[in-house]
Image (cartoon, rainbow, N blue to C red):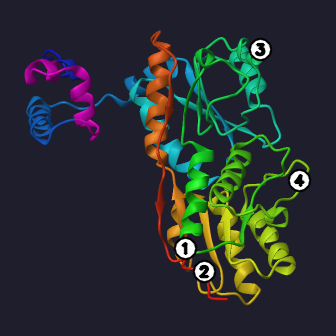
Amino acid sequence: MPPEVKRPTIKDIAKAAGVGVVTVSRALNDKPDVSEATRGRILALAEEMGYRPNRHARFLKLTHNPAIAVMMKGIDNPFFGRMLDTMETAVRERDHLLTVVKVPHWGDEVEEAITLVDEEMVAGVIFLGGSFSHEARVFERMRVPFVLSTVSRLDKVPDGMYSSVSVDDELEAARAVRHLIDLGHRRIAVLGVDPADVSVGAQRVSGYRHALEEAGIAVDEELVRYEVLDQEDPYTFEHGYRLAQRLLAERPDVTAVFAIADVLAIGALRAIREAGRRVPEDLSIIGFDGITIGDFVEPRLTTLAQPPERIAQLTCDILFDQMASGPVQHVFVPGMIREGGSTAPAPAL
């Protein structure tokens, strides 16, 4: 029998190309941060050398390493869905698998993570969504690196105990409300959360209040709309629909609405149409997040858009830096107003 021909590896290609193994891996997997000239040279060498990826060996390596756990509050949130795709890719590139754990809105994601780390083979934790009211003592029990993603810095926890990546929810919410104010609106409602809620929604409602106060507009508490929910997720189309129904029935004089999440805004659009009001001719509405479905409703939703892929990638980069004994980091990523057709100048009185 002829001798078995040695199968070329990524290391062989890297040596032939005069580049690092990571560069070859990114080129072969069509990832960014590789010049087109280098990518073309690597692909040509791989073809010439007869390289074929060993999928079985790759999977064994993935499953051998401890997993990265994502503690996810809001499993149905389309914004989080886009983040998970980026996180999955980033984690697999580093030879780990991603484990997603659904945590109900009223659950304690940190306690659940501590239990998971104690019972499972977990190398790091990402908190995707969650509460900003945790205290330092609970984080002291976390035995692996972790990052808060889409949750900004915590008042009761020293900065040096954790990392975070998010937009500045209060600042960006104020920006969204100022967009309505700049259009001449003065009777602006907010579709928010119960004041006892400790999710980012409370920070966005606070941004609404600050924007009105800075513009010299008194906050009308009747226009701060929420429900006291018993173990129910407030970030749903149905919740936005119910809030808008009651708002329009009780305060038909409102000319604009800020919804603290796009799903609430989209639910509200249906209630507005059913009430015989036109958007944006009679009533303007702006959301928060920038989910894809907002581009496919009528009218297209104006929103304060977050960059989900950038937040997700930074979250993973910081987590793996910490796993390599790097420092904790706190990063605010800017959002931006993405104008659709749901906002317009306030109607003339």
Which segment is the magenta one?
A: 12-33
Circles 4 and 3: CB distance less than 8 Å?
A: no
Instruction: Quickly name the residue at label 4.
Output: 229
Q: Residue at x 49, y 47 (%)?
A: 308
Distance from disc 4 to disc 3, alpha carbons, whole Å, reads 28 Å
Instruction: Quickly name the residue at label 1.
Output: 183
Q: Residue at x 14, y 14 (%)?
A: 3
Tell us which disc is closer to us: 2 or 3: 2
Instruction: Quickly name the residue at label 3.
Output: 137
Circles 2 and 4: CB distance less than 8 Å?
A: no
- Closer to us: 67 or 140: 140
Distance from disc 1 to disc 4, alpha carbons, whole Å, reads 33 Å
Instruction: Quickly name the residue at label 2.
Output: 346
The three-letter code of the residue at mark 1 reads Leu
Circles 1 and 4: CB distance less than 8 Å?
A: no
Distance from disc 2 to disc 3, alpha carbons, whole Å, reads 49 Å
